[in-house]
Amino acid sequence: MATSEPFEIPEFAADPFGERMRLAYARSWPVLGASFVFASNSEALLAIAGAAYEGLPAHRLGPVPPVFHIELRLVPALAGGTGEPPPVQTSSGGGMVMGMVDASNHVIVAPAQRRAVITISEDRLAYPYHVRYELIEFAVYLLAARGQDLVSLHAACIGGEGRGVLLLGPSGAGKSTLTLQAALDGYDVMAEDGVFVEPKRLRATGVPNYLHVTDDSLVWLDPAARRAVMASPRIRRRSGVEKFEIDLRTGGLHPAPEPFEIVATILLSAQRTDGPLLEPLARDDAIVRLTADQPYAARQPGWRRFVDTALMRGAWVLRRGASPRATLEALAPWLALQEAVG
């Protein structure tokens, strides 16, 4: 009796969408008041996430941190996929949000399921900055904000002893320079460009991992601090601007160890003055300025509650002083300095 070879189903036909991909590597980190569990089929891809989230303080906004799951999937490189990756294009529908670079590089976020899937091609491992900030951060920020009803602000935040001030303002207003000065002077740093606030209690969290500054920020530093910053790696923004990437988790700096209670909202101005640096804002003026400064946040469900609560504690314009330290000293009434190092 003749025998036949067992019928083999081609791998692609058996699993055309890669749903049974083996994700052999996993790590979890506390991020933005939650616990994020990352699973991947690639140690190298998981290491990119680790560079962002390893060693962060475990902020807690509630008694039990929510858990979010992110899959990091490494797939073969596309033919011709060389050079800097194109920008991410976003889309949404059916309760999901998508960031698309190309067929092999994209992120799908399902906030209601507390899950995200990020697909990266092998050639993009050569661009960890883009993978980290444009795809992994995309998923983490969306899940944390929507899963905890937080208002997501483009802002910096500094403070001490559990109290912090929000620093808002357009690019070039000096958020990063002022945050660098605060870090060198021993203040706790919550974030330099992304702050997440509970609108009712005005408690804020962030990702205090990196601080990015240009060469212009170094002219005010003493020689030792300047050398330390210049020893940091450089990253290149899509705008072409190069910045030093200072790791707040090393060098004796102070990532915020716990969420901050926001005690003041400060709108930074690039205008220099020899007079008083701080100017209080009337309520109507503050609402107009905050809304103009935060177009994304102003469309979020908790925006109105955030503004009402923040303005009960006051909003000010802060103009530039003779130096970043002089500007920082204007915030002394709200900041609790834990240890002077500068």
Image: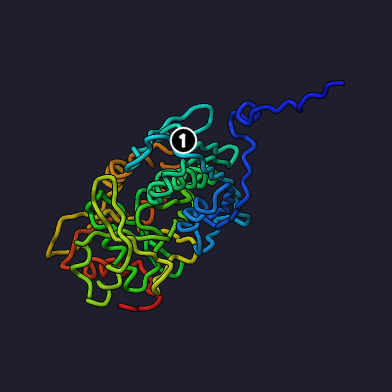
Q: Quadrant of residue 323?
A: bottom left
Q: Is residue 180 left or right of residue 310?
A: left
Does any portion of residue 32 appear in the rendered image? no
Q: Residue at x 62, y 39 (%)?
A: 21
Residue 87's image quarter?
A: top left
Percent of width and height locating residue 95? 53, 31
Residue 37 picture location, percent across and down: 59, 51
Residue 268 in view: yes
Q: Is residue 118 above or below residue 245?
A: above
Instruction: Report whether 302 appears left or right of 117.
Output: left
Q: Secondary structure at mark 1?
A: loop
Instruction: Determine the residue positioned at 23% across, 54% down.
Output: 173
At horizontal 32% and vertical 73% (from top left) the residue drawn is 185
The residue nearer to you, when weighing 179 against 278, is 179
Left/right placement of residue 195 relative to residue 83 reads right
Count the marks: how many? 1
Q: Please state which amino acid type lies under the numbered disc 1.
A: Ser
Q: Which residue appears at 50% of the width and 57% of the height?
A: 50
Residue lying at the far top of the rendered structure: 1
Outermost residue, left side: 274
Looking at the picture, how far across and down is residue 58, in whole percent? 54, 62
- Considering depth in this image, is 307 or 164 the residue closer to the camera? 164
Residue extending farthest right: 1
The quadrant holding residue 6 is top right
* Quarter of the rendering occupied by the N terminus: top right
Q: Which color scheme does this rendered protein use?
A: rainbow
Q: Which residue is mark 1?
A: 104
> In the rendered view of the protein, which quadrant contains the C terminus?
bottom left
Q: Callout 1: 10 Å neighbours few (<14), some, many (20+)? A: many
- The one of 94 and 238 positioned closer to us in this rendering: 238
| Residue 250: x %, y % from top left | 41, 70
